[in-house]
Amino acid sequence: MKFIRQSIIGKALFLFAVLMAIAFGLGIALNRGGVDAIPTNFFLLAVVSGLALIFILFAADIVAPLKRLTRQVQNLLTGKSYRRIDPTTIDEVGVLTHFFNEITRDLEKISYDLRERRRMSSELDIASQIQQDVLPKEAPATPGLDIVAKTRAAAEIGGDTFDFLLSPDGSQLFIYVGDVTGHGVPSGLIMMMVDTLVTTLVAQGVANGRDIIVKTNALLTPRISSRLFMTTVMLRWVKSEQKFYYTGAGHEHILVYRKATETVEPIKSGGIALGMIPDVSKIAMEKEIPPLAVGDCVVLYSDGITEAKNQTGEMHGLQRLADSLKKHGYRPTAEGIFDSLTKEFQGFVEEYVQIDDITMIVIKYLGPDAAPSKVKLAVSSEEASAEHKSKVWDWTS
Amino acid sequence: MVSTYSLSTEIIRTSFGLIHAGGEIDQTGLPDLENAVKPLLGNPALKILVLDCAALTFINSKVVGYLVYLHTTLAKSGRKLILAGLNETLTDILSLVGLITILPHYETWEQAVENSKS
């Protein structure tokens, strides 16, 4: 019986067999009743009735479901609204109906996923834009300091940050670079929190880097996951003294190029990353960078620079960056130094698919009498296109 | 670039969870490290987890973040994370972010077990 239910041919053979059985039975019955011959008209009527019966049964069981299915397939193909059909048989038409239902279910899921992806992509674009708006587009020009700062996120949302904030009385310039663990949305949210906190604290008149770090950490730690933290180093430029002070929070070294000796001093930033422990007041310390001479240079960066790997898996590293600075620190402008460091970095990583956010700030000290120069800033993010990935790494997206 | 690493765990003296990690662990190896540590983390009888880093050559900031998470999660339930066998690179990485100041560390995992009371 299963063969009959599962196959149209089986059904046709079954109906034919039934018809033959009826004809045979009728023949026997007529024979027993003494009827030797039947009129032609009666025979034809019986044949036509039998065929009509087969047709009706065939139409009800096969043609009608097939027509229902065809109508819905046409609706699907022409973009009209369609509905799923309950399969009433388990033959080929039933299998096709089931297939149609599965296909439409999958199509709806894919369509939903696409819509969801488009929505998320659009929200990511908005978030990325908000984040780029938070990052500085211009910085206060400070007499004596020539500055270039660039950041490039590894995804739409980055975890690196930097900013230049003038104290309310204009006597001090705070420069900081920060790097949240990893990259992407969670890091971006932490970065936004820290930027907001630091900006607020400076605007409220908190006058030194240590207090800013301690207060930021105290406000940040209870509000973030214990897996996330942000390393940062805060420089404080005191205009009257023409001196930098620094407070580290577990960040990379500060590199100082000395023009007179053509050497580079890596200064350990110290401290503990923001978000690791609730109170860093006993750890955070503000220290002085030994006075700069005209032509000296300070470089801040994130670990995206030092941990970037070349094609053989070798890391760029602090030493390579320090050696580059030693070679190019003599250049007269921050831009010249920045471009040379970038060129050497590019030469090392070549076609690097950026996996971490990269930030670098170059500050050239031009002396107290130098005219203020415009701070050059750039913010960009990695594009996920294959086309871009075949190019040599650079700061632009 | 695929990071190459090795991971194994064992339980010592019923209350020490020991994780032997080797090679370079970054974001690609982190899920395996988490999976390896998970059963130890979920075992309340283990009062101290010792991360044996003797064969570990590099960790990135994501792994450092995970160590901070391990430290805080264990501390909340009165348990402890101890590091052992840190090489120079790892010491530099952990001291850079300041983690070395909050995590106890020993030269070998045997010393960590000997000197720690569970």
Image: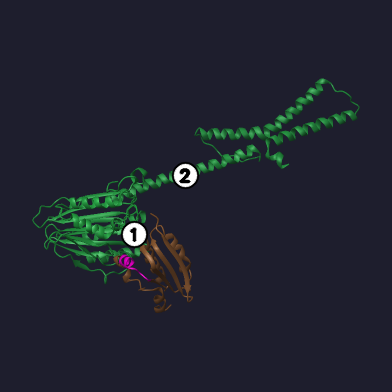
User: Which chain hosts label 2?
Assistant: A
Foreground: disc 2 or disc 1: 1
Q: Colour of chain A?
A: green
Q: Which residue is mark 2?
A: A112
**Residue A151, percent from left and from top:** 27, 52
Q: Determine which quarter of the picture holds residue A184.
A: bottom left
Quadrant including the N terminus of chain A = top right
At x 47%, y 42%, the residue is: A111
Per the rendered image, the range of residues in magenta is B84-94
Asked whether the viewer can see residue A135, the reply is no
Look at 39% across and 61% down and name the residue there: B25
Q: Eyeballing the image, is A270 above or below A15?
A: below
**Residue indicated by mark 1:** A181
Count neighbours of disc 2 (C-alpha within 10 A) and say few if under 14, some if 14 to 19, many if 20 or more. Answer: few
Rendered brown, the chain in question is: B
Helix, strand or loop at label 1? It is: loop
Q: Name the residue furthest front.
A: A312
Three-letter residue code for mark 1 = Thr
Q: Is residue A365 visible?
A: yes
Tell me, what colour scheme is on the image?
by chain
A80 and B17: which one is in front? Answer: B17
